[in-house]
Amino acid sequence: MNGLISIIVFIPILASIIILALLRNDKFIRRFSFSIVSIELLLTIFAFSLYDKAKGGIQLVDFIEGWIPIKGFNANYLVGIDGLSAPLVLLSGILGAAAVWGSWRIKNRVKEYFALLLFLQGVVIGVFVSLDLLLFFIFWEAELIPMYFLISIWGSGRAHYSAAKFVIFTLFAGALLIIGILAIYLSQGINSFTMVSIPELNLQGIPELMTGANFLIPVSVIFWLFFISFAIKLPLWPLHSWLPDAHTDAPTAVSVMLAGILLKMGGYGIFRISLGFFKNSSFNFDVAAPILVILGAISVIYGAILTIRQTDLKRLIAFSSVSHMGYVIIGFSSLISVVSINDTLALNGAALQLFTHGTITGLAFLLVGLVYDRTHTRYIPDLGGLTAKMPIIAIFFLIAGFGSLGLPGLSGFVAELMIFLGTFQVGNIFAIATVIGVFGVVLAAGYTLWMIQRSFFGNKPSKESPVSKDFEELSDMHILDVFPVLVLTIPIFVVGIYPRLLTDIIEIGIREMFLL
Amino acid sequence: MLFPMIILGFLSVVVGFLVNPLLDLGFVSKHAFSHFLEHNLFFDDPKEFHFVFEVAIISTILAIMGIVTAILVVKGKLNIKNNFVYKILINKYYFDEFYENLIVKKFFYNKIGSFISWIDENIVDKSNAKISDFTIYLSKKMSKIQNGHLQSYGFVFFTALTVLMIVFFISNLNTGDSWLDLIDKLNSEIY
């Protein structure tokens, strides 16, 4: 029993309860939340640095056996991190901090807002560290509670519609997930919720038990139940239609959390369960992998073309997420050819893409929020020449844009290059899909630069634009906005310049899934 | 601006002589650039190159014509603004316009882009709406069953029971059991 991971999960949740139950003063609540996420950021960095790469495996484990006292119910409280989840826990720390720090302007229902935001951060970290399927599912569903209220109360536009759409889609994903979990749990020879094997605790995980199991329903059905569930969350074409609405209508901080870590829950599930559970089972990836890579390639191009046509800054970035998450699936499909550690390049890249997209898109949403606060519009034709009035915001917007289009030196490049190299080597349809994916990068350059060109450079807004009247009064970044922006920008550069910081640890996680 | 341009202009005139001098200059050997080019992928067997008089004459004449034209245009003695060649050249063979308007705007943005948008709005997104509409439709239809009349609940209950029993007996037709055996079996299956 180490306790660190449990502390990381429950500090924000506890803090949200404290805010709701004890605190009254808005100013104090704001400061309290700022300090909680700062502590959380330090703790996640600490946990990440504590992970011993030489030792590998699951580390910092907290284990309470049979925490639900029902006879014959083998659910445990089991949390810990491995090479796959450690970067995502770090990402949650970073984005949680950015989201809360970036919310200092919130005036409406401050108490509820920060309580829900902190609760959200806690449960999402819970998803990443849970090693027991039931616990995983509880955290997975608990995330919906704060999200629904955050979007529908503090959102803009069709906030109620988008919140409901998001909840229904995610609940549907959750329904498929619970069917999959039960099908696995009730299958003869498994009867366990443990997601990984931990030899030190004498725990046999599902990946190990899958080989000899006698499944209740065909194993391919179970695979697709899980996969569709995660694909909704990721999101993968054609299950993406909740995402643009939810992103566009959510408040800035929630868009940051949504793009930054909630989408990564789907990616994490794909790695942990779709790959981790099924690669040793009788499930045949030879049929599934080509389907996945085609869906991934469609997502990339489809998302990118739709992105180009968007006229709302937030909606534009939302659609670019669909495109970028397509790369994760393209990289993931290369699992079909993995026989040695040399073949996991694309899988490492896909797992790294989860992290890099989190920081880059988080930054982009944060900056769109800053622009919107000043101009009160996100409609691109109404903007223009903003660099003259907000040069610092423009600089960071360029960094986010360049990161998004995969400029070498920034983190997006590393992940995408790894995915392309690794998947191209598989050959056949995978090589074709990779080539299509590379064209997605060209389109990414198109939509990113065109968006920045139209909103930040060029002429001042025309007379008809609502921005033109107060254009001269527009201000640049406030000193308090520097912190959330920097906390997201630093990882973009650090990972871009020294990717081994993450790839080394991700490789351990991937390697252990294949028992290489 | 003039001074840097003088430096650049001077260098651009003399640099050709310097990198490929006709004589050995000491710090640059004779025909240095030509010898450098000898050793590359395409000339692994370097041959002797001769000075071709015709080529030199033609290129020199073309260069002088260009210089004379430029002087005339700058001095205003020659008006080329309405020249067809001039228009093509000044617009870079209209390649940018062709690419920007036809390929990017007309074909990619308007045709492909709007087609994908249409699919996203009318097929992908609408199919979700259709599914939710269908759920609402079903729940409206089914809410009619809950009409509060005890007799209709009873009717449904006994109809369903009868159907289930018929199914049970039909599925046991070929087992050879007598009716009483079947009723016993039914009893044991219920409890």
Image (spheres, coloured by chain):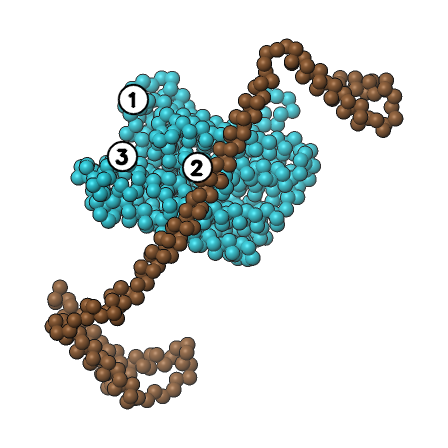
Query: Chain A is which colour?
Result: cyan
Find disc 2 in the rendering and name its residue: A243
Q: Which of marks 1 and 2 is nearer the N terminus?
A: 1
Q: Which-is-in-front pick, marks 1 and 2?
A: 2
Q: Tell me, for residue A26, which label it has, or none.
A: 1
Measured in 3D between alpha carbons, the distance from the residue under mark 1 to the one under mark 3, in whole angstroms, is 24 Å
Q: Which chain carries label 1?
A: A
**Which lettered chain is shown in brown?**
B
Q: Against A262, is A412 above or below?
A: below
What residue is drawn where x is 33% and y is 38%?
A366
What residue is drawn where x is 83% and y is 20%?
B182
Q: Residue A28 in the image: x percent, y percent? A: 29, 23
Q: Against A255, is A443 above or below?
A: below
- A197 lies left or right of B176: left
- A229 lies left or right of B161: left
Find disc 3 in the rendering and name its residue: A376
